[in-house]
Image (spheres, rainbow, N blue to C red):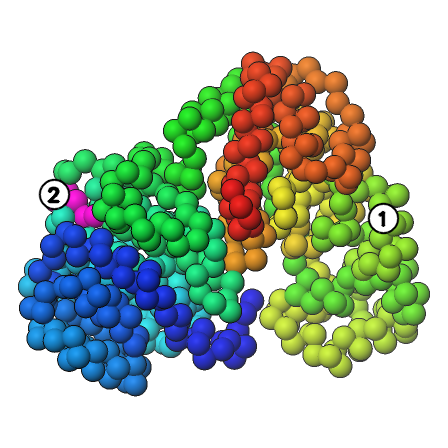
Amino acid sequence: MKFKADQTAQKLRGGYYTPQNLADYVTKWVLAGKPESIIEPSCGDGSFLTALSNNNASKNLKINAFELFDIEAEKSRLKCTKFGFVNAKVTEGDFLSWANKNLNSIEQQVSGVIGNPPFIRYQFLEKEFQTQTELVFKQLDLKFTKHTNAWVPFILACIKLLKSGGRLGMVIPSEIIHVMHAQSLRTFLGEQCSKLVVIDPQEIWFENTLQGAVILLAQKKNEITDHSYGVGIKHVKGFEFLNENPETLFNDTNAINGQTVVGKWTKALLSPTELELVTRTMRKSNVYKFTEVADVDVGIVTGANKFFLVDNETVEKFGLQEFSHPMFGKSQHCKGIIYNRKQHTHNEENKYPTNFIYLEDDFSDLPESVQEYIKQGESEELHKRYKCRIRKPWYKVPSVYSRNLGMLKRSHDTPRLIFNELEALTTDTAYRVTAKGMDAAKLAYCFINPLTAIFAELEGRYYGGGVLELVPSEIEKLFIPIPEKLDFDIEELDESIRTDDMAKTLKMQGYKILTPLGLNNEDVDNLVAIWERLKNRRQRKDH
């Protein structure tokens, strides 16, 4: 968990200002809708106000802008004066406070919204801003989560304040496409808007950050009963797209409706042909949803991994042999899909923390050397950490058990089920998986295929670094093809994953697992190509 004290002042105020060329492009599209009034909810030093002038907006355009910081607000006021916007008002204060008082006011509705809302996690917001954030969700009768980010209620409020047929153009985090905390927003946008287009860049637009950003163009329905075309995602590389009229780009971007709008927007990354192939494959009779063939549970939560996960040297030093159990929890601990004695010995030789320390006796009943180890942990105040201090005694970890399958929470190329032959323990950096009514080794083998890899990209989430992460609820939505009769060699696959390119491995697995279900080699090749494109997008490689 990240704490407020660790964050920079820029992060705490969400101060990442939009490059002028992007602000101009977004504003050009909104102005094409001929708005009479505009809201800019977080104007900063005025790049979007400059964009209005650069696009020859009417001097009589009604502009209602907000900025929390006085110095920046004054810069924006001076720009409005300089550009001759006679109906412009820049308010120094919190937009959400104003919006919550006016969400249901017809008089305050506008026909255009532009801007770049603050990117601030809910946990880093001041108490009053947290209250205003929750109130937006409450007034719109939407599910609220404390994992949200400030930009989410900003967009919710702006869409609510937008007149029928109005336009919203904003630069926002790319995570809108896939993070769970934005689901209420995605659903609301799907209900309220006739069409949504996300301009998705290969590059990171904000310098010196890992924050990926996109442009959201949203056209509100003229009436509640208006047809919704859904959401379309336009991939761009560099700034060549700025030479295309944004109206043309918006109209020409294919949109996908239905399940794409009510869930994550990741399926909109697929072309209609690609979506048809993926859908056709997942509907094969021997393709199962994860929950049909396995259960997933979180790993062991220690609260102080440095104390409970140790190398052999520490075990020897404090005489912990009786209390140590084999464990793994990082990708370096298992490069393939089999965790056995050979892999464990390799980890020991590399001095990895391969031992989980499980202590259940009272302090006085433990050997003196083990007591000394506990005292050392207390000298480092490990017993005061949240998960530790709520346990009695603090060094006794609950829910310690192993399963014959494991899965690391994060992955670089694609997630793997690891056949836990050694029945090693795993911490909460991995999941414990139980096969239901089938051989665990076969499930681990079948899990490596292009269809499952595609769904991992569609259902998972990632952030600036491009590492894929799945939580249990996302894992449960994966699809796994499992032919009834399959002659498989898990050791051969383990070696392939360790030594070959993942695309090559997925292709070979596709031929072995998917062709018996009725797909041809071309279908498999196309599925691998889809996975590779989605993976490269996540990792910001050329696709």
Mark 1: secondary structure: helix
Q: Which residue sits at x=23%, y=74%?
A: 66
- x then y, percent, for residue 358: 79, 59
Which residue has dot 1 on it? 344
Span highlighted in magenta in the image:
219-224
Give left or right: position of 135 versus 4: left
Which residue has dot 2 on it? 223
Q: Residues within 10 Å of mark 2 (few under 14, many from 20)?
A: few
Residue type pointed to by label 1 = His
Q: Which residue sits at x=39%, y=38%?
A: 268
Give left or right: position of 8 versus 354: left
Label 1 to label 2: alpha-carbon separation: 63 Å
| Most common SS among magenta residues | loop
Q: Is residue 443 magenta?
A: no
Look at the image and tell me whether residue 95 can be seen: no
Q: Which residue sits at x=41%, y=58%?
A: 213
- x then y, percent, for residue 401: 73, 48
